[in-house]
Image (cartoon, rainbow, N blue to C red):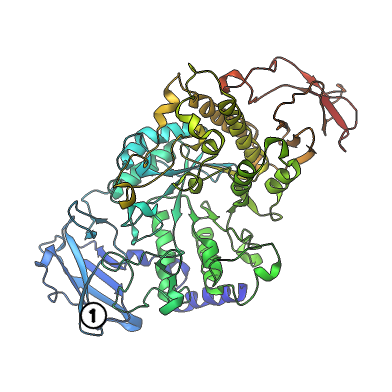
Amino acid sequence: RYSLFYNHLKNIEESEGGLDKFTKSYKTFGVNQLSDGGIYCKEWAPGAEAVFLAGDFNGWNPFSHPYKKLEYGKWELFIPPENGCSPVPHGSKLKVVIRAQNGALLYRISPWARYVVREEDKVNYDWVHWNPPQSYIHKNPSPKRLKSLRIYESHVGIASPEGKVASYKNFTHNVLPRIKDLGYNCVQLMAIMEHAYYASFGYQVTSFFAASSRYGTPDDLKEMIDVAHSMGITVLLDVVHSHASKNSEDGLNQFDGTDSCFFHSGYRGNHQLWDSRLFDYANWEVLRFLLSNLRMWIEDYRFDGFRFDGVTSMLYHHHGIGTGFSGDYNEYFGLHVDEDALCYLMLANHMINSLHPECITIAEDVSGMPALCRPVAEGGGGFDYRLAMAIPDKWIQIIKELKDEDWNMGNIVHTLTNRRYEEKYIAYAESHDQALVGDKTLAFRLMDAEMYTNMSVLMPLTPIIDRGIQLHKMIRLITHALGGESYLNFMGNEFGHPEWLDFPRIGNNESYHYARRQFNLTEDDLLRYKFLNAFDRDMNKLEERFGWLASPQAYVSEKHESNKVIAFERAGLIFIFNFHPYQSYVDYRVGIESPGKYPFLYCSYKILLDSDAGEYGGHQRLDHNTEYFSEEFCHNYRPNSIMV
């Protein structure tokens, strides 16, 4: 794998003048404004017989501005300035006109288009030339690389209690302050790359270089990122390079009139479950396109890194379909691995790390591919983090299938700590996957229909709501503290959002009712959602103070099956969880490492975070003024212990 990567890198150096020049192609491909007012256009259309540019600027004459054919399927066009001004005004509509091999004229959006919009009465998107007289100028530097990542997974369009498509402006003014207050230091933005179908959640991308216009303009997004940086919040883009929409009128599919171009032709070029096209990662121009795409989002918009979606689909020719992964190395090495796709990921991480070492990359891989998060120089994939995707599945399985008294403490600990040596994992109890219609969030699984009737503090606290609120907090804290080197939460799940997520579509009469987040519920003092919101905030603030995510993996001293107790130490803190459905304990001994410091023979411990506290909807059974003193008494293979 490293040999394949190295050969690609060597070829880029020899034929393209280096990785820096190769990945700057976003500045030359597409339609670009020159300093003298002229326009330079460049496309890659190897299957085209001829290429033209048409639009408002030439009265939509399809033949007046032909491209010149270059080597290797490239085409270029230069349009001189008119009286020192651009011949293609800002805001004018454009189309690349392709004469296909069968003689047909195809009107296409450039794969490199920066701004596409759809008018209310139209089905397809229009390509609009974006060249404002004054582009947004970033005022704030990007935050320094974080040691502890606390990620707030977000979708701009649903980030409002109102049933509508919310805007970049709304996110800037109303959601970013909320994220900051909750103690998250990183926001991961979904559905930014333009996608024609809103209900695809942004995973059927049609224009890879265009920020979605349904939320506002490119400058609105730049301002949003700039404001986030002013708050010290790192901003990651959910990037989709694993596949592309099948749209041809306003997407990449059949851009030059052939079945291939950016994709594999035939069966290999189609994803049978996603109904989308699959990139040909061995193609030189596809590498140019995808690597330049990453660089554009970093340099033009100031994104601080990426979460790569669908990595499992990229890594294997079977795309993970109908395949289980047990951890056997035969599952990761063999002819079923798509080495070209893996090499692309190595190139992408090498480029990002070389040109922008402050940026972060995350892999969404369910297979557990070894060394995915080790440096490229070691033959690894080069990612900084990978998602711990087994954890939410485990919590769903436990809640769905087991009685409380049957919960297995050892199995919970194993799932939370089972990760590859020296590879960083992002732990999460649930993400957007569990919030979507057809699935259930943890809050919904725990409290279900009673969330609609018994979440008011004026109503008696029922056993279902009580159990749900307490377990919601405990599950999130133990996942946060034990499950990885970073933590992720999907917007609204921190307070147990009471409804699923469903985008407007034919099946729900194009309703926006469930395509929203009811943040207002946490601001109502009469509703119990405020308790979960406060606990999530204080949990993050405590991590910010002690930095357990950046600390070595926890030492688990106890996973007691009959007592249902889990205890562990991390970052100088002791975490103790009692998952027993009805049993509390007095004078419970917990083993610890620290004996105290000279001249003292003991350590004094106090409660820092208590899920049973009143401000979190608990029963206030513990006195927070109590001090717990260590004893030189061995317990659970720890040299000292405390009684709690």
Tell which residue pokes out farthest to the right in this image: 633
| Side of 213 where 60 appears, left or right | left
Out of 309 and 468, give the one closest to the viewer: 468
Residue 504 image point, x, y percent: 32, 47
| Side of 560 where 44 appears, left or right | left
Out of 398 and 7, give the one closest to the viewer: 398
Name which residue type carries label 1.
Lys
Up the image or down, 297 lies above or below 454; here it is: below
Up the image or down, 12 lies above or below 141; here it is: below
Up the image or down, 433 lies above or below 586; here it is: below
Look at the image and tell me whether residue 149 can be seen: yes
Pointer 1: residues within 10 angstroms few (<14), some, or many (20+)? some
Out of 52 and 83, give the one closest to the viewer: 52
| Side of 291 where 461 appears, left or right | right
Residue at horizontal 33 percent and vertical 83 percent from the top: 71
The N terminus, quarter of image: bottom right
Residue at horizontal 64 percent and vertical 23 percent from the top: 612
Residue at horizontal 43 percent and vertical 63 percent from the top: 274
| Side of 78 where 589 appears, left or right | right
Residue 127 image point, x, y percent: 23, 61
The C terminus, quarter of image: top right
Task: Give the quadrant of residue 108.
Answer: bottom left
Secondary element under disc 1, as helix, strand or loop, is strand
Residue 493 image point, x, y percent: 50, 37
Residue 457 image point, x, y percent: 49, 18
Look at the image and tell me whether residue 16 can be seen: no
- Residue designated by label 1: 68
Count of numbered circles on the image: 1
